[in-house]
Each structure stands twice: as C-alpha cells, then as structure tokens.
Image (cartoon, rainbow, N blue to C red):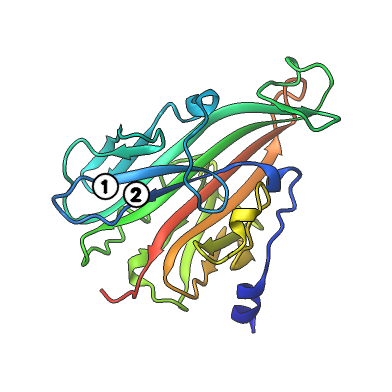
C-alpha cells in the first residue's frame, strides 16, 4: 500500500517560499572509460537545463568537481552553455561523484514579496531573509560494469547532503535505495526527502516556478536514514530542504540549505 501511495503523492513543500525558489542539481552524460566526462549544473525547475543568468553565474564560482578513487579534480567550463563542464582528460572506468555548490547568498523580500540579493541590513522594509546555500551531488558509474560502493557512499562534508548507502547501479526498479541525510555531518532526523524522475510530471513545461509533482516522499528516521523506492528506470532527483536560525538575527533570519542527489537507475544487473 505504501509503494502505491508514494507513487501517487504530489508533494508541496511546506517551507515558506520553497516552491517558488530555483533549485540546483547535477547531471552527467553516459560515459565510457577513456572518454571525456561531460556534466551540467541544473539551476531552475523540473529537470530543465537552462543557461544561468549573467547576474547569477557568481553563485557557482567554484564550478564543478569530480570525486573518484584517485581523489578530486576540478572540471573545466566548456561549450556554448555556461552550465556545461568537462574533465580536462579522459576518465577511467569506476564509480564517481560529480558535485557543485551554490555559494552562500542572502535573499530578502519585502511585504510585496519582491526579492533582492540583500540581507536585512541592506534592504530597508525587508520582512524575510534567508542565506541560501545549495549542494548538488550526482552518482556516475563510468563503464557498464562499474558499481563500486566506496566512493559514492562516503560523505563529502557538505553542510547538507544526501549520502547514498548503496550504489544505485546495484538497485533494480521497485527495490529500495537507502540514503542518509546529514546536516553539519550529523544525522538529520525527521527531514522530508522527496524524489522524482524526469518525465514523471507531464505538465512540467507549463508549470513555471511551481514545484513539480513528486513520485516519492518520506521522513528520515532517528538515524537520518530513509529508503527511497524508485519504481521505474530513468534519471532520478532526490532533494531535502533544511532551515535553521541564522546566527545574527539582525542580519538575516534563516540559514536555508538545499541538497539534491541525482542518479541514473537502470536494470540493476551488475
């Protein structure tokens, strides 16, 4: 009964303003050993890649990183789209994490809900402020036989992160993918994790800023863990939002952290 109801659930984010905010995720193309790895920063809504507005490019000034068995390497921005990155050299077969971060940025709005990249001190008339931080992580298995656990299940130390406890390449549709949500390195209890796959919401192109329908939603347990139930193959995006009081309330009210974990779910036959 739970699996059926989870598929039908359309999640509306309970946190103020969350449904209107851009979200950030990471995706990468199918890659064979000995090829250049190509990856993208998704910033917007509903699995749609778009060029990042010039006044927002600085949010992603750290670019993208590839974390693998041999360590971490920076990706290089290439091509006509400013969200597209590639490795400087071909990559070997194996399991990797591709990551990106949205730098800490103040966002405030006034009573008319007009937003600006300012703190409370810098925006007279502001009624709400959050310092936004976003963290994206993509599981990439280079080569058809790659399904290593060690790299992909290791926490990276992001402020908020979704840590897979199994390589998605080992999971078949309808089985469970266990994950753990960490905040400042500690399990985040009672956090709502939602997940969906590209194409689940057929109306997403007309939705604008509205949050797309979710195929799965569940709260983490007392260890910050939850089992995602991906019911079909495809490109999946799991996400968690956590807000906490900002240290200086005169400057801003909330520290808002947003995390996504993306992965390709195939047949699981490895």
Please say if the residues under marks 1 and 2 sit with CB atoms less than 8 Å apart. Answer: yes
| Number of numbered discs on residues | 2
Q: Secondary structure at mark 1?
A: strand
Q: Position of residue 162 (x, y in %)?
A: 49, 53
Judging depth in this view, the residue of 223 and 35 nearest the camera is 35
The residue depicted at 36 percent of the width and 39 percent of the height is 84
The residue depicted at 28 percent of the width and 57 percent of the height is 30
Q: In the image, which disc is placed on residue 68?
A: 1
Residue lying at the far bottom of the rendered structure: 1
Q: Position of residue 54 (x, y in %)?
A: 50, 25
Residue labelled with disc 2: 97
Label 2 Cα neighbours within 10 Å, binned few <14 / some 14-19 / many ≥20 = many
Q: Position of residue 136 (x, y in %)?
A: 47, 45
* Above or below 270: residue 161: above
Judging depth in this view, the residue of 126 and 150 nearest the camera is 126
* Above or below 245: residue 45: below
The residue depicted at 54 percent of the width and 23 percent of the height is 55
The residue depicted at 66 percent of the width and 53 percent of the height is 207
* Mark earlier in primary sequence (1, 2): 1
Left or right? Give the position of 147 relative to 92.
right
């Amino acid at each position: 009964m739970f699996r059926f109801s989870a598929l039908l659930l359309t999640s509306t984010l309970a946190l103020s303003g969350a449904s209107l905010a851009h979200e950030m995720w990471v995706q990468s193309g199918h890659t064979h050993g000995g090829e250049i790895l190509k990856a993208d920063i998704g910033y917007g809504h509903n699995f749609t890649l778009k060029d990042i507005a010039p006044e927002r490019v600085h949010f992603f000034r750290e670019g993208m990183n590839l974390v693998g068995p041999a360590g971490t390497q920076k990706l290089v921005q290439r091509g006509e789209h400013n969200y597209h990155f590639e490795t400087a050299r071909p990559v070997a077969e194996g399991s990797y994490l591709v990551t990106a971060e949205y730098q800490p940025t103040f966002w405030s709005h006034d009573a008319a809900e007009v937003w600006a990249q300012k703190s409370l001190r810098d925006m007279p008339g502001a009624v709400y402020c959050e310092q936004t931080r976003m963290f994206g992580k993509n599981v990439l298995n280079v080569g058809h036989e790659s399904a290593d656990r060690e790299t992909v299940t290791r926490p990276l130390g992001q402020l908020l992160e979704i840590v897979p406890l199994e390589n998605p390449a080992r999971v078949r549709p309808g089985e469970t993918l266990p994950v753990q949500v960490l905040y400042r390195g500690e399990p985040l209890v009672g956090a709502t994790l939602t997940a969906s796959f590209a194409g689940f919401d057929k109306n997403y192109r007309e939705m604008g800023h509205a949050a797309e329908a979710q195929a799965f939603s569940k709260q983490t347990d007392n260890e910050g863990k939850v089992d995602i139930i991906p019911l079909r193959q495809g490109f999946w995006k799991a996400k968690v939002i956590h807000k906490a009081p900002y240290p200086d309330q005169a400057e801003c009210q909330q520290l808002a952290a947003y995390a996504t974990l993306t992965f390709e779910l195939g047949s699981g036959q490895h």
